[in-house]
Image: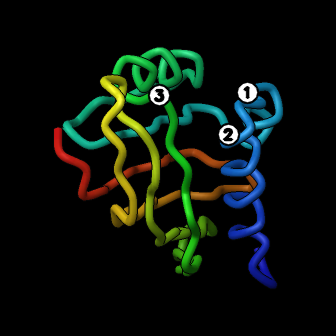
Amino acid sequence: MKDHAASRVVRDYLDAWAERDLEAAQRHLGEGFVMTYPGGASFSRLADLVAHLAQRYRGVRKRFERFDEVPAEDGTVIVYCFGTLDGDFADGRHFEGVRFIDRFTVRDGRLVDHRVWNDLPR
């Protein structure tokens, strides 16, 4: 993929996810897609992730700082997305400016892996 096409796939997915347009987000996922969140929680279905996050947050917004691409020898592209999180925990406590890094593996224009790191308390 050239001209930051992998970053565009990631950004389009994240935009669909932010709007909770799960159907649009799903179109960006490749076969065997897995996402891993802090604490080791792993999901292969977006609906399962939504249910998991609803237990912890009322809402979260991402503010993107940058996207970095790293091409791999096997034709995949690793995309790192850096930024901060603002939102509210399920109990009403507010947070803002929390650092995050998302790491995506993009293969043939589809996401096959998503790993999340952030400074939110568990």
| Residue furthest out toward the bottom | 3
In the picture, measured across the screen, residue 4 lies left or right of residue 74, that is right
Q: Residue at x 52, y 57 (%)?
A: 104
Q: What residue type is labelled 2?
A: Trp
Closer to the N terminus: mark 1 or mark 2? 2
Labelled pair 1, 2 in contact (Cβ < 8 Å): yes
Image x and y of residue 26, in percent? 73, 31
Image x and y of residue 81, in percent? 52, 68
**CA–CA distance in space, label 1 to label 3:** 17 Å
Depth check: give the residue in front, 119 or 49: 119
SS for callout 1: helix
Image x and y of residue 64, in percent? 58, 70
Query: Label 3: which residue?
Result: 58
Query: Label 1: which residue?
Result: 22
Q: What residue type is labelled 1?
A: Leu
Q: Residue 17 carries which label?
A: 2
**CA–CA distance in space, label 3 to label 2:** 15 Å
Q: Which residue is drawn at 67% across and 58% down?
A: 10
Closer to the N terminus: mark 1 or mark 3? 1
